[in-house]
Image (cartoon, grey):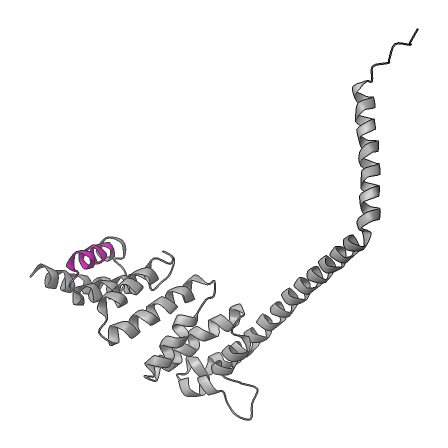
Amino acid sequence: MLAKKKKLSKKEIKQDKLVELYYKSQSYFGQNKNRIYMYAGVLVVVVLAVIFFVNQRAASNEKAGVELSRIMELYDQGSFLEAIEGRQGTNIIGLKRIVDEYGSTENGETAKIYLANSYSMLGRTEEAFKYYEDYSGSIDMFKAASLSGQASYYSINGEYKKAADLYNRAARVSKEIAQRPEYLLQAAINYINAGNQSDAKDLLQTIKDDYKTSSAFASVDRYLVQIDQ
């Protein structure tokens, strides 16, 4: 008579599956070890490359910060051409070269705004617009400056709707930006020039309601009267 087959417990079934998985893994590794080693090697190379890139980028950003700090005295003094080109015979290399060499770093992106401002102050609007438009940093103040710089270019060239929309975007980058009421005012003025009285009135009312202590507030009633005429 055949002996009754013993029923396996859940624990024994689990152990059997683990043993089976172990042998399958061993078999798979034996058949594919060359490929596995190759993939592991590639992964190590990628990880090392990423670490190297991050370290290099951090070092470049730090260097850009040092160079930018050296040029700011000239910029603050209003020596805009010298700020752009640097000062020969010194270690001040100028905003143009900082942007060329470190433009992909955060401090290099910041240098683009100062470079664009310098060109703008010298009346070189095409060159200023190029660097305002090229800004892609992460600092809200400079994002807004980039948009307002582009807006100024379009306003000068009579493209008032584009200018108004860009000033409006600049104002909405962040409520913490000190220039926000001025951006709203410039947006309103350009909407008026574009024939969009409704949007202009809404922005002027925002300044009147929310920014009573700003310099832009003093001009609001004059433009509201202009709209209502």
Instruction: Identify the residue shown where x is 69% and y is 59%.
Output: 47
- Residue 224 visible from this viewpoint: yes
User: Closest to the observer: 15 or 141?
Assistant: 15
The quadrant of the image that shows the N terminus is top right
Image position of 133 with respect to 14: above or below: below
In the picture as drawn, the residue positioned furthest to the front comes out as 1
Examine the rendering and report whether any part of residue 79 can be seen: no
Q: Residue furthest top?
A: 1
- Nearest the eye: 24 or 117: 24
Where residue 146 sits, quadrant-wise, is: bottom left
Q: How many marks?
A: 0
Residue 97, horizontal then vertical, whole percent: 51, 82
Q: Residue at (77%, 54%) from the top-left corner?
A: 35
User: Residue 190: where, in percent of width, then height?
Assistant: 21, 66
Magenta stretch: residue 200 in it? Answer: yes
Q: Which residues are magenta?
A: 196-206
Report the magenta stretch's main SS: helix
Question: Which residue is found at the position 28% from the left and 62% from the top?
Answer: 165
| Residue 15 on image: x %, y % | 83, 27
**Image coordinates for residue 122, horizontal then vertical, percent:** 34, 84
Q: On the rendered structure, is 228 left or right of 43?
A: left
> Would residue 216 be found to the left or right of residue 112 on screen?
left
Q: Residue furthest bottom?
A: 89
